[in-house]
Amino acid sequence: MADKQVKKNDQSGGTDEILLEVKNLKKYFPVRTGILKKTNLKAVDDVSFFIRKGETLGIVGESGCGKTTLGRSILRLEEPTSGDIIYDGESIIGKDMKPFRSKMQIVFQDPYASLDPRKTVADLIGEAMDIQKLYQTKTERKEKILDLMKLVGLNSEFYNRFPHEFSGGQRQRIGIARALAVDPGFIVCDEPVSALDVSIQAQIINMLEELQREKKLTYLFIAHDLAVVKHISTRIGVMYLGHMVELTDSAELYRNPLHPYTQMLLSAIPIANPDVSASRKRIKLVGEIPSPLNPPEGCPFCTRCPKAGKLCREELPKLREIRQGHFAACHNIS
């Protein structure tokens, strides 16, 4: 096993313990585009990054940019087309995933569709414990489930109830308890609050942060709400059309966005102060996202970028370190 206390020169200015490393990950879906023709839909295209133990890496971007596919591919819920995924120093590509399921879990986006309506709360939370054989007796199983319910703010009276009896926020708490049942070190949070009311969103986010501190969890937090991502993330990666176009610390991204796409996203965030909002210049995002079945040559953002030149339309820019710890994929940034 490789030494985990190594210096990462590709995306970090310092030496830190790495829990998860993704190298040149690709996930292509073959799509029939004619009677005898198939074309690859490049959902995730050559994405690399790492996540340190105990931190939260936020992933943002428009719908269809590949955020969810990236998270699912890391857990091998979708089998990657190519690339490598290294968890705690060990590659999981080509391996039996059962031992890793107790280390890597997911909280799904839709709390209504992700829970089996035929199972009780106890069975939903206890299913992974059953598979991993994490208890000796039925009494121990019940105690563990009740402890998890208490941990996520669910009343013990809900033990034998079914998902249809709960609100969206309560269902998401069940989903979080289910993910925690095997005591994982890493959780993919796939837009866990996007289907919830704003007041409930805050409760779930606060709970995720408390759980992270208590259990020393590491998150990959996928969302399209930039305000939510800023609040919870240590670092943020911005995706566009399957590519990672910018990656840096959360505060740095909001203070000094480098990629034109990131600048446009941040300029669209509403500000509560009307005076500040009126004086701020909005950068309009022109045009539609190109089809991932037929992406543009060169930079994936060149068809919508006001700064795009000849090189942008011919050559794909690499994600490179512009300043310490701040990476961007743009030919026009020096």
Image: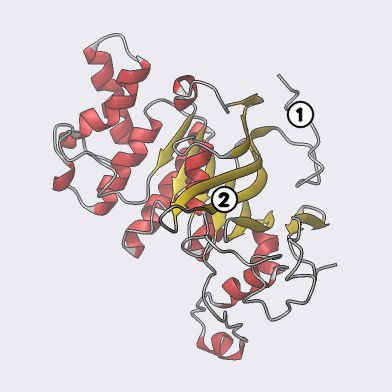
Residue drawn at 33 percent across, 31 percent down: 148
Q: Which residue is mark 1?
A: 5
Point 75% across, 67% down: residue: 314
Q: Give the x, y percent position of residue 165.
A: 14, 46
Q: Quadrant of the C terminus?
A: bottom right
- Above/below status of 194 relative to 56: below
Q: Identify the amino acid type marked 1.
A: Gln
Q: Amino acid at mark 2?
A: Val
Q: Nearer the viewer, residue 252 or 91?
A: 91
Quarter occupied by residue 135: top left
Residue 319's label in the rendered image is none
Give the structural element (helix, strand or loop) at label 2: strand
Residue identifier under label 2: 44
Q: Residue at x 70, y 68 (%)?
A: 259
Q: Measured from the top left, where is residue 116 in percent x and y? A: 22, 38
Q: Residues within 10 Å of mark 1 (few under 14, many from 20)?
A: few
Mark 2, Cα crowd under 10 Å, few <14 / some 14-19 / many 20+, is many
Task: From the image, state whether disc 1 or disc 2 is nearer to you.
Answer: 2
The answer to whether residue 55 is above or below residue 62 is above
The x, y position of residue 332, in whole percent, is: 80, 71
